[in-house]
Amino acid sequence: MIPPRLSVFLAAALLSATVAFAQPAHAPVLALDDLRPGMKGEVWTVFRGTESEPFGVQVTGVLQNALGPGKSLILCELTDPRVQSMGAVAGMSGSPLYIDGKVVGVLSYQIQKFETVRYAGFTPIADMLEVSALPMTKPVPASPLPIPVKSDRGSRGNGSSGAHARAGGDFQPFRPVFSFGGIAPQVAEVMAPHFEALGLSAMALGGNMGSGSTDAPLPDLKPGGVVAAALAVGDITMAAGGTVSHIDGKHLLAFGHPLMTLGATEVPMAEAEIVTILPSSLNSVKVSNTGRVIGTFSQDRLSGIYGEVGRMPHLVPVEISLPARLNRKSLNFSVIQHEMLLPAIAATGLTQAVLGSNEAGLTRGFRLHATVEYAGRAPVEFSQLYPGPQGFAQGVGEVTANLQQWLFNPYERTFPERIRFAVEETEETPVGYIELFQVSRTTAAAGETLTATLNWRGFQSEKSSEQIQIPIPAEWTGKDLEVVLASGRQLDEITGRPRSLGVNQLRNFDEYLGMLRASRDSDGLYLAVVERSSLFTDNTATTIELPGSFERIARSADAGRYQKREAAVPLFEQHLLPGRLFTASIRRSLKITD
C-alpha cells in the first residue's frame, strides 16, 4: 500500500511539477526537458564523517533512452578539483544533483576509467520515484541466483553490474562495494572467491560500530547523507555504503542503481560513517564504518533502492559458540533471507571463528557442530571434523557448498529461524592412517563368523588394532559379496546415495530434510558387507531388483521421478573409530557357499 502523501508526490514529480521535498532546502524538481548543456550544479555527498557537502559539476547533456525505453541518463563533467582528480567514488551512488535549487537526479553511473577529464552519469529523479511506488510484495526465491554475474574485468571496485562497455567509453552503474566489519583480512581473502562467484565485490577494509542502543532515536537522514545496505549485521557485518537520494517522511530512496537486482526484498538499512576516501585512477572508494540497523530496504530495482526508516527486516540469526578458553565465547550476527548469500556469510563467520583471532589456535583440530532450526520442524543437525585451521581454510568451499545444500531448498519459501554452530577443540590431531586391513577368509558358509582385522595408527601415536566379527546369515548363501572399509562419504557413493537429488525426485521439503539427515557420519570408518545390485528409486524409496515389466511401466509414466542405477546394497554395516579422519577405501571379495 503506497502512502497517500507519497502517491501524490510521485504523480506530481512525474508530471514535472514543482514539488516540495522533505529536506532543509525544500528543493523542487527540475524537469529533464528543462535541462540544458552548460548548466552548473551541485552534488551533495559525505566526504568524511556523516555531514554532507557539495561539489561542482557541469551538465554535458542527456543520453536519451540510454538505460532502456523511457530511461535516460544525465551526463555531467565533474568540475570540482577534489573530485576531478579521483573521479566519481563508489559510495557516492545516490548523491543528489541540484541545479538552481532544484533537484535533477542522482549520481549513479561511471563513465570510462582512466579518463583525462572525469565525467559521471546521473539517474533522473523521476525514475527513482517510480521505485518508491512499487508494491511491497513477498521476496521471490533466488532461482538460482538473482544477482549480477561476475564481471570479466575482475575489478574489486566499481565493476560491471550487467551493463556492457560501449564504443568510446566504459559505461556502467557503480558496482556496490561490500565491506566487512568484524572480519580479519586473511578471512576476507579466503572468502573473496566465493563472493566473487556470486557477483559481489567485497573488501576487508571496513569497520563495524556495533548494534548500538535500540532505545536511541532514529537518525535525521537528509538527501546527501550516508546510508548503508547491509547483508549481515551484528558482531560481523557486510554492507555497501551509499548516499541518501530523497526522503519523504520515513520513506527513503538511495543509490540510483541496483544493489543486487533483488526486486522485492528485505535488506537491512543501516547507519554508517565515512572514514575517508581512497582515491584511485581506476576505482576510488569510500571507506566506512557500519552502524545499527535503522530500517529496511524493500525494493532493489534498476533506478535505485527504496525503503522505510523504522521498519525492521526479517533476518536469520546465526550464533557461533567458541571454545571456553577464548576471551570471546561466541559470535552473534544476523543475515538476510537469501538462499545463496546466507550460506556464504555464515561460512564467513565460521572462518572468522577459526582463523580470525589471536587466541583461537585450534592447531590440533576441532569439530564443528551445526544445528539448523526450522519453525514447526525438528532441528536438522550435522557434524564435521577438521584436522586444523589450514584444513578448514582449504575446505571452506566445501563448507559453503554443504551449507547451501542444507539451507537452500526448491520446495518451500522457508528459511531457518536460527542457525547455531559450535566449534569444539580436539585433544589431539584427529587424523588416522590404515596400516593393515584383512578378512580371515574369502569364502565362508552360512552360520559362520568372519573376523576383520584393522591395524591403524593415529597422528604421532602408537599402532592400534581392532577386530570386528561379521556373522554370516543364511540369506547370504550363494552370493558374491564385497567387504568394504571406507569413509562415510565414500560408502554413500558406493551404495548409490547421491549427494543431491533433482527436484522431481522428492515430493516436499520434509523429504528433502530427511534425505539430508540420512547422511553417514563424515569421520571414522565404515566396515560394510555389500552386494552389487540394480536399484530402482521412486523419489527417496528404493527397490532392489525390481522386475523389468514394472520398471518399464513406471519409467514410461515419469522418467524423471523413477530412476534405475547400479550400486552396492549394504547387508552389514558398522561404524568404527569415530573422532578421526581417514582417507582409506579398501575392498575385499567374499563368496558365501552352501
Image (cartoon, helix red, strand yellow):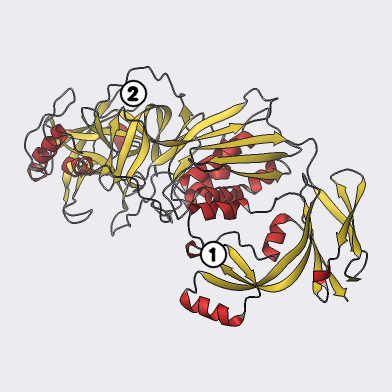
Circle 1 or circle 2, nearest the eye: 1
Element type where label 2 sits in the image: loop
Residue at figure coordinates x 39%, y 42% from the top left: 283
Q: Nearer the viewer, residue 409 or 448?
A: 448
User: In the image, what residue occupies the spot 62% across and 73% down?
Assistant: 565
Q: Could you tell me how far apart the alpha carbons at marks 1 and 2 are, in whole angstroms?
A: 57 Å
Seen at 39% across and 48% down, the residue is 159
Dot 1 and dot 2 residues touching (CB under 8 Å)? no
Instruction: Check residue 539 in the rendering and tell me which mark sits there, or answer none.
Output: 1
Q: Position of residue 315 (x, y in %)?
A: 43, 36
Task: Give the image location of residue 218, x and y in percent.
Answer: 32, 21
Task: Please state the total of marks drawn on the protein image.
Answer: 2
Q: Of the residues shown, which amino acid type is indicated by label 2?
A: Thr
What is the secondary structure assignment of the residue under circle 1? loop
Residue 237 x/y as whole percent: 47, 33
Q: Is residue 88 left or right of residue 561?
A: left
Amino acid at circle 1:
Asn
> In this rendering, would 124 be left or right of 318?
left
Residue 50 disc label: 2
Q: Identify the residue shown where x is 34% and y is 23%.
A: 50
Q: Is residue 434 visible?
A: yes
Q: Which comes sooner in the sequence, label 1 or label 2?
A: 2
